[in-house]
Amino acid sequence: MKRFLVIQALVLAAFPAAASAEEIKLPGHRAVYELSLGKSDGNATVVGAEGRYVFDLEDVCSGYTLNERLVVRLAREGDTVLTDYRLSAYEAADGELYRFSTETEFNGLTGQSAEGNLSVDNGTAELDYKTADDVTFDEEVLAPLAHIRAILEAAAAGEERHAATVFDGDVDKPTFFAVTRIAKNDAVAEGTGKDVIDMLDGIESWRIDSVYFPPSGDTADTAVPEFRFTGTLYANGVVNDLMLDYGDFALNAALQELEVYEGGC
């Protein structure tokens, strides 16, 4: 199953209203989500899901280090699949360098892995994989945190849509064309741990709806998205009420714990 690039992208930070994307700082923090089955249509074999996702971000002045761990058990008709996904990454503060290493296990057996560097310069990008062929992009490609800063900038400016080619890291499909719709939200936080609800009470928020297409940039009605997420993005950077939609089934991700680190730059 596809990596959970959306959660990685959406546990965010407070930002000044007039800041540019490069000026937006993400505070170091640790967020824990509880995963459950959201929907399963008539053609899906997934009948149940449970798991946990941990996102750990640290501000190291020159950029950010990011560690993720996602473990989810999918119950299918006749069997179960336990997916264990791990990411270690560094992203420069200006988004021009992204170093990453990922590994995914399925039922205890190594299934997928990737390691390399993404370098971005003047509207082009170069992807150097350690064990796969290099890739050159003749267009701007946003690293994960740079993509989020761009969405935050759009929200702060009152924009209702943001679109960009974004980096995912998968060897077979390293990029996607992401279209994000942004709408003001007035709902009260619910469905999370009590401490998290208290932290979100009264904070301005937006509903985010992002659709990930193949990288051709074709978003016509005939284009089939590979992934979609919806969630509530708060002005303090926290995301709640998150749903990850894989087409024939979807997962709910409820924020249960949040710790903000002191320090940073």
Image (tube, helix red, strand yellow):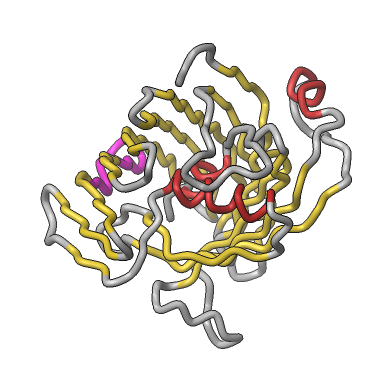
Q: Quadrant of the N terminus?
A: bottom left
Vertical relation: 3 (above or below) 26: below
Vertical relation: 227 (above or below) 157: below
Give the residue at x 53% y 72%: 225
Please tell me in which quadrant of the rendered image residue 259 appears: top right
Give the residue at x 32% y 42%: 104
Magenta stretch: helix, strand or loop mostly:
strand
State left or right for residue 137 relative to residue 49.
left
Magenta span includes 113: yes
Q: Quadrant of the C terminus?
A: top left
Of 222 and 220, nearer the camera is 220
Give the residue at x 34% y 38%: 91
State left or right for residue 161 relative to residue 134.
right
x, y percent for residue 150: 53, 52
Q: Residue furthest top?
A: 262
x, y percent for residue 200: 78, 29
x, y percent for residue 255: 67, 31
Of 96 and 229, nearer the camera is 96
Q: Residue furthest front?
A: 18
Vertical relation: 229 (above or below) 10: below
The number of numbered badges drawn on the structure is: 0
Please tell me in which quadrant of the rendered image residue 68 appears: top left
| Span of residues in magenta | 103-114
Vertical relation: 160 (above or below) 83: below
Give the residue at x 14% y 60%: 134
x, y percent for residue 219: 54, 80
Of 15 and 222, nearer the camera is 15
Magenta span includes 228: no
